[in-house]
Structures are given as structure tokens and as C-alpha cells.
Image (tube, grey):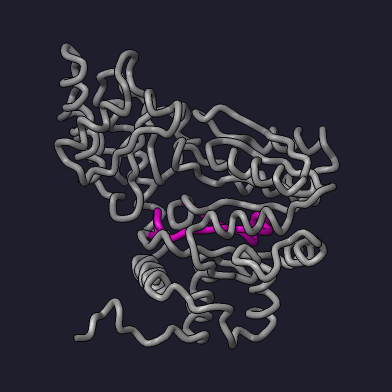
Amino acid sequence: MTHPFLDLPPLTAERFAAIERRVAALLDTEQDVVITQGEALLPLEGCIRSGARPGSTALNVVTGPYGQTFGNWLRDCGAAVVDLEVPFHTAVTAEQVAQALAAHPEIDFVSLVHAEAATGNTNPVAEIGEVVRAHGALFMLDAVASVAAEPLLPDAWGVDLCVIGAQKAMGGPAGVSAVSVSGRAWERFAANPAAPRRSYLSLLDWKERWIDGGRRALLHAPAQLEMLALEACVERVESAGLDAVTARHASAAAATRAGVVALGGGLTPYVHDARDAAPVATTLRTPPGVNAAELVARALAADPSLPLVAGGGALAKEMIRVNHYGVDATRGAVRSSLAALGAALVELAPGTTVDLEGAGRAVSDSWS
């Protein structure tokens, strides 16, 4: 008995390369694009271990937990690290980056997360890219949560390494990712004796054996189901139109923010300024005395399918995340999430007043 998921013909090098071209078109990039066979932490770590080394100095912008992870990797590579940390309720500014670069002219590598789904903020990459380009440092961007949710133009913004994943706004699989690599970045990698080689983390292997070889022979057997799912989700984005997909995510973010303000009950947007809020997830601060993890658990008990999660680590007590990305970037998902949070809040904190109908109206009225 044949099975549609198991009895598939091998994925050819030609088709693998065709999927890479479609990803490059999605990013509007002329740079080399490498599809990596694993979750996006794979190319992110590969970029850092290829670009950082003893003697180099990195500016690591921390606006959430992934920035903290990058700093650890950079130090592990022997690089001196300058951490630029900003509160999680806001975004970093190009001026702050410029000041850090001026204070440390030796910086030759900059790492930044575009949108932090975990904390609900997003950073102004176009302006930051201008500053980094003028300084001359290599610029790495984690765009896993921003691709297909907001404008992403690595070439125009001077991004040397742009890492994406398909599992959020693209609505695709988590087990495959991609990175666009500039010519400057390839030169940096090749000049680094500590860069991974003959390793699953090695981007240079893909350059030398795949790209330079004319994309005729794959390095190893591809993750076939994930590659086909990636192709399908890129096709879906192409069919809907990238502008329409990003507009839907922007609408979901605006509607969630407006809805929670109308809901009341002490829930407030965690990110203070709407312009700093990520379009993939809206983070909320719980009122004093209400544990975020307990509130989310109560809401999910009524409907386990809702895209709600408590913050990680110390934030689990005070932060709720409404994940309105991919298939959940809809009015229905936003309305249902806020209604469940409102009902759970009344149960957990008797005497609390919420306006469920007003929240629903605000969601509908603010959806553009």
C-alpha cells in the first residue's frame, strides 16, 4: 500500500534549486540563498560561527531572548561582544546603534532580531541598516518572525545575512529555513579559519560544493517533506500576494491592540508604542495579582486551539502572547482569543469588569 507522505520520489537537485529561487524572489534579493535542513537556529548559529572569531568585535542588539542567545554564541566563538540592551516593551533605534558603533569603532559584526515574537516588538531595520553600512560592519538579521508579516528587503537595507523560517507568518513548516548571504559575508567566512567546515553548521560547504558547483549535486539527502511544505507555503504566499499577506498581519496586530484596550479588565499592551509592536504577535501585561500563566491556562481550557501562550521564563507571570500569524492572522482568531482571555480574567479575579462586546466591535472596526 502506497502512502502519499512516505512513498515519494527523491527530491532532485533541480527542484531544490527551484525552491531556493522562489525564496530569493520572496526576499527580493540578488544574493545567494541557501536553504538549510533544520529549524532557523541552524543557519543563525552557522552565520555567527562563520563570521565571528577571536579578535573580532560584535555589536549584539538585545530586544528579546534570541538576542541573548546570539550574544552567548558570539562569546563562545571568542569575539568581544558589546551588548546593546533595550527594555522588551520598546524597540531599539538607529540612533542607539549609531552611538554604540561610534563608542566602539572596532565593531565588525552586528546581530539584530527584526521582530521578536517572544516579546512582541519589532525593530526599524531599514534605518539601522543604513547606520551599519556606513560603519562597514557585517550585518546579520534574524527575520524568522518578520518574513511575510512586514516589509523585508535585505538587499535594499544592506543586510549581509538574512535568516528566515517558514513556521510563522508564512504558515509553513518549522523544520526548514533559509539564509541569504552577501558577497562580503562569503569573503568573511572564507577568511575565518575557525568557520565550520565539513559540518552541518557549515555555510561554506554549501557555497563550495553546491553554489560554486552549479547546484548540480546536493550535499546530503534533503528533508523532503519539509522542502515540499516550504514550496507549498511559498506558493500560497505568491498566490495571495506578499503585500496582501503582510497587510493581513498588520490588521491582526492593530485589531488585537484595539480589542484589548476596549476589553479592559486591566489587560494592557506590553509594548508601549504601536509603531514598535510586531505584526506577528501582540504581547499583553496582566493586571497586578493576576498570573499570566494561570490566565492563559484558564483561557485554553475553554478552547485549546486558541493561539495564546504565556511569556517565557520570568515573563510567565506577567506577559501573555496572542500569536496572530499564519492561519491565525484572522479576525475570528483575534476575537476568540480576546473573548477567552476576558472570560478567564473574570473567573480568576472576581469583580473584574470586562467589555466583551466592545472588544469584538473594536476588533472589527480596526481591521483594515
112 left or right of 138 in image = left
Residue 157 included in the magenta stretch of the image = yes
The quadrant of the picture occupied by the N terminus is: bottom left
214 left or right of 227 in image = right
In-front residue for pair 262/217:
217
Q: Is 157 drawn above or below residue 72 in the view shown?
A: below
Give the percent coordinates (x, y) of residue 312.
42, 34
- How many tags in the picture? 0
In-front residue for pair 214/246:
214
What residue is shown at x 47% (from left), y 50% (from top)?
145
What residue is shown at x 65% (from left), y 55% (from top)?
157
Give the percent coordinates (x, y) of residue 23.
50, 69
227 left or right of 20 in image = left
Give the percent coordinates (x, y) of residue 70.
62, 44
Give the percent coordinates (x, y) of residue 289.
31, 14
Magenta stretch: dominant secondary structure: loop
- Report if residue 218 is visible in the image: yes
Where on the picture, by quarter, is residue 321?
top left
Q: Is 200 drawn above or below residue 109 in the view shown?
A: below
- Report if residue 135 is visible in the image: no
What residue is shown at x 66% (from left), y 44% (from top)?
128
Residue 48 included in the magenta stretch of the image = no
Q: Is 5 drawn above or below residue 97 in the view shown?
A: below
In-front residue for pair 39/329:
39
Q: Which residues are magenta?
A: 150-170
In-front residue for pair 366/24:
24
